[in-house]
Image (spheres, rainbow, N blue to C red):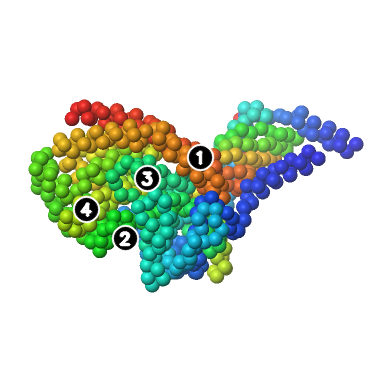
Amino acid sequence: MHLKFTLFLIWTIVLGSCVKEDLTVPKSHHLPVFEIEIDPEYLWSTDSGLYVIGTNGVFGKQGCTGLFPANYNQKWEYPALVRYFPEGEELSVFEERVGFRIKGNCSSRIKSMKSIGLYWRSEYGNSAIEYPFFPEAKTDRFKRLTLRNSGNDFGRTHLKDAAVIQIFKDYARVDYQEYRPSVLYLNGEYWGIHNMREMITPHHFKFNYNVDDDLVDLLEGSPLAPEVDDGSSEAFLQEVIDFIKSNSLKETENYKVISERIDIGNFIDYMIIETYIGNVDWPITNSRWWRENKVGGQFHKWRWVAYDHDVAFRSENMTNVWIGDLYGEPYDSGKIDGFFIFNNLILNEEFRHDFFSRYLFFIDTVFDPARVERILMEMKENLREEYPRHQKKWDTLPMGRWESSVDKIISVNRKRNEIMKEIITSLYEES
Amino acid sequence: MRKVKLIVFISVLLSINEVKAGEPLYWLTYSQSKYIYSPGIEACYHFRERMGVNLGLGVYFQNPDPSSLTNITHNVSFGFYCANIGVSGYLFNFENHSAGLIAGFKLYYGPDYRKLRYYEEGGYYIYHDASDLQPDYGLDLGIFYVYKKFTLLGKWDFVRNRFRVGIGYRFNS
């Protein structure tokens, strides 16, 4: 009897760890739900499937360390049908034909679950969608949306980049992508938690700031040799980089000139955020800046966009501080050029004063440990109900380890806050 | 009566343990799962008949089929796969036959291909590498059998639900 019971117990444990919940039956969720219908061939076939490595692939962007060419690195776009269900609703509020792409940099694309880009275009039906996906956003109008896999953070907290945004968005003078977690069903099958995000394109700036998207210059990468996402880099290289190279920003007159070309407040906040959180996947990588090429316009100055903070607040980088020439050692010598503008601006007394005082404000207010803890707890709570199903689908961290990984952000910030306060206070007093 | 005989028989087995302490056991082990072939080694040393320690290590060779995979995260051909550490003890010992239990902590850091969905049009399954460059850890449990100098090992781990077998040798102390 005991033997039978023991065998039953062992069998139950073994079987229990193998059996999976039926994930094909849609259930009500307390998160918004996207349903995407797309020809399975566009996802899974070896020659044209976007979700597989396949046989028709390419290598990722230059600098990517992908092991092999993959279909998912292709910029193919396929037609799809998307429906959207607000949280708790069983009826969709819209059904739209859109373009379907795989998004993200190479480290994101090699994850099991991919980031998906949804493209509204007139050839599919509507050229944009008007819906309040993000209640706090400046706009309800979108041409592009990303259903993000959390990038490098996939399989870990699943909210890292979004958490950084939530922490700074009410205070910082930087541009960012709004966030809202959602659930995806792909061809009727449960596909896990996808972070709904705005996509950084000229349309984003048009809808958020009412600028002319045809006049947007959007650059990325190294400030010394930027890649052009949209528009042109010519003005930036001539008016910013060449000017700094030939004029010392120590001089008030030169600083005033550059202040007319760069949004200094934006730049200060951007540098504070990226250096405080210990973003080792930055600068140069995940660096974007933009302007509207319209003399006298409100957004004529260059502004930076804070995005992709998936490697922020890592415990192994907690004591690792790099603020260009000002403090610390480079995470990566190949990224030194990313600090070119900052290294010159910090020579100026006015900038230095503004930078340090603003940094101390961020340390005491924005990254205040109690505030960060409250934000993280709210975000964790928001995902807690959905996470077990996501975990079963993708074999990510078990619930307990997931919660610990989110809690780790809180503990890392607590320590980081002390470290940065000591460093910045000391630098401020010396200056 | 049969039950009494059985109890007496087991009692005799348990009471006549001998010579096993101080004689290390070594196994060459092997485990296989989708696209992964994992040889390894395992060793066990008993301070006493019922108390010993064991250590194991495994590497992987993999031969994944990119056409049916969403991702490959680890080195595409070879690498470290798993390690385990634990305790062991003999359960019975009768003439040249003996057997025991092994239990311990197991850690994986290697690929882990799992079914994602069935691709009907292609007639095959799509797999994904669920390991994502992160360690998995948990418990494993096994039994070993020794006949004279030769020994066999069978282990099940509750981390990835995989079976590992071993064949080995018992050395004299």
**Could you say which disc has been placed on residue A13 in the image?**
none
Residue A222 placed where, x, y %?
24, 51
Mark 4 lies on a secondary structure that is loop
Tell me the quadrant of the picture where the C terminus of chain A can be found. Answer: top left
Judging from the image, mark 3 belongs to the subunit labelled A
As drawn, is B157 to the left or to the right of A308? Answer: right
Q: How many marks?
A: 4
- Would you name the residue on which mark 3 appears? A165
- Would you name the residue on which mark 2 appears? A203
- Would you name the residue on which mark 4 appears? A298
Instruction: Give the quarter of the image for residue A102.
Output: bottom left
Q: Nearer the viewer, residue A45 or A339?
A: A339
- Would you name the residue on which mark 1 appears? A403
Q: Mark 2 and 3 residues: CB-CB less than 8 Å, in contact?
A: no
Marks 1 and 2 belong to one chain? yes
**Up-down relation of residue A124 to residue A115 (above or below):** below
The answer to whether residue B79 of the structure is visible from this angle is no
